[in-house]
Amino acid sequence: GGPSWLRSSPLRIARERDACGLSISTRRAQPPGVMKGAAAALGERDIEGEFTEHFIKAVHDGSFVKSTLSQNKGEDRTLLNAYIKLVEIKKLGKALSVVSRHKTNDITKNYDANEAGAMLRDLFNEGFQQGHLFTLTGDWQLKLGKKSGLKRISKPAFDEAPELWHDEPKNSIISSTVPFLQLLGVTSHDGKPKAGMGDKLRQIQKFVEIVDRLITEAKFSARNGEPLRIVDMGCGKGYLTFAAHHHLTEARNMRVQTQGVEMRKDLVDKTNTYARAAGMAPMPEEGGGAGAAGLSFVQGMISQQSSALPGGPADVLVALHACDTATDDAIFSGIQAGASVIIVSPCCHKEVRKQMDAVSSPNEALRDVVSHGILCERVAEISTDAIRALLLEAAGYRTAVFEFIGGQHTAKNIMITAVKDGKTRDQEKVKKRLEMLMEFHGIKKQRLATLLERNGAPAVGTIAADVGTIGAPDAIGAVDAP
């Protein structure tokens, strides 16, 4: 019984052959001591086969979310994981995209969805010992080897399937054929994403959509011919820096001066070379001075810019994936510079995480939460970003905290945006909310609060006395470049 695709699956055919004693050659070679083909012939449970059946069924009934294979014990020990997701490809239709993650590189291959069983069997043949299948009806965990087993988790981790990525996105805010995407290695000459760069292209498109909306909300207007100034702190390879500059200059016809700040000189040199090659660098007729429009990159660290931004004040301050307190330094720089728009995507909340432990937490109700590592980490992330949003509000910004792009594309997916709205806040009320938040979570210091307090911010003025000694900050975080 069952649907035709399952009745004719390679897995079922292999089982029928085994049962008849015709062949067991389709079974994968096992590590020494694990004779799976022989076990199957003796009637033992084939948990890898069951896992594969659940995988195939989920792919075809629409409940598939994603799958991960790990614990490689095969010959190629550089292979660490395999990540599988559904995509929509012009030539194949619905397909399975597999990213094989090695120690030094990723390899992406696409497979017809009808070949799901054979594809998965080939991956297990590589030597993976663990598999995790996420579906809308329940998740499955497979473990092979001496302590093998197959476990179903009835409550699924995801309640909706991710939107299928298409190789030819329609109505994209950035054309996939623009030269800078090719220079940066994101797309090929025909506009198709290169291997492993599909998620990066989605991230670029989403970021530009957010920038476009925030620019509209901020109601920027011409200022005596001065260009809109954007500073991207910790810009890494500059994917999003290039994209934002391109969109605002080409689609919105604005004069824009964009400057990326990056501590690695080799990346600064490369991105400046790409900017010139793409025709986006400041033009000679602009004079190359402080008011020159164009895209450029300079060497520097976020922690060095807390008092003054390179090149002068900024209208838009961006800092994506700045590690730990480097996000706070970037936010403070934006506030100090009077930026109308601040965009950050925090990473690594170590400062607050260290303060949240079951022993020192003054909040008895919270103790049983922070005593678990993963829960403590999440509480640290949530509370830190809530503090940042509240401090931005106190500084005169309308703030929002949201998911930047789906978690299936990147783990670093929380974004905080702030648009200066000129509204006056009740500083005493904001200060009280901040005190309550920090006291509840046992937080005695937070980098952004420290910086603003030293600068005389009214909402933070006496928190050191009320909450505890804020003291000097820990070593300022570096940049985890996107």
Image (tube, rainbow, N blue to C red):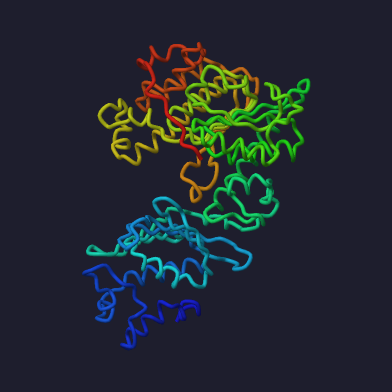
Q: Nearest the camera: 371 or 130? A: 130
Q: Which of 111 and 460 is in front in this view?
A: 111
Residue 174 location (% of width, % of height): 68, 46
Q: Is residue 384 left or right of residue 164?
A: left
Q: Residue at x 39, y 51 (%)?
A: 103
- Left or right, 30 with respect to 393, comes to left
- 155 is higher (above) or lower (below) than 179: below
Q: Residue at x 46, y 12 (%)?
A: 454
Q: Quadrant of residue 445?
A: top left
Left or right for 373, reference 290: left
Q: Position of residue 32 (x, y in %)?
A: 23, 68
Instruction: Answer above or below: position of 369 versus 38.
Output: above
Which residue is located at x 66 percent, y 55 percent? 189
Quadrant (top left/top right/bottom left/bottom right) for the N terminus = bottom left
Q: Which of 436 and 399 is in front in this view?
A: 399
Q: Position of residue 344 (x, y in %)?
A: 54, 32
- Percent position of residue 216, x then y: 70, 33
The mark total stands at: 0
Left/right placement of residue 48 relative to residue 458 reads: left
Nearest to the observer: residue 431 or residue 37 = 37
Give the quarter of the image for residue 82: bottom left
Residue depicted at 51% across the width and 64% down the height: 96
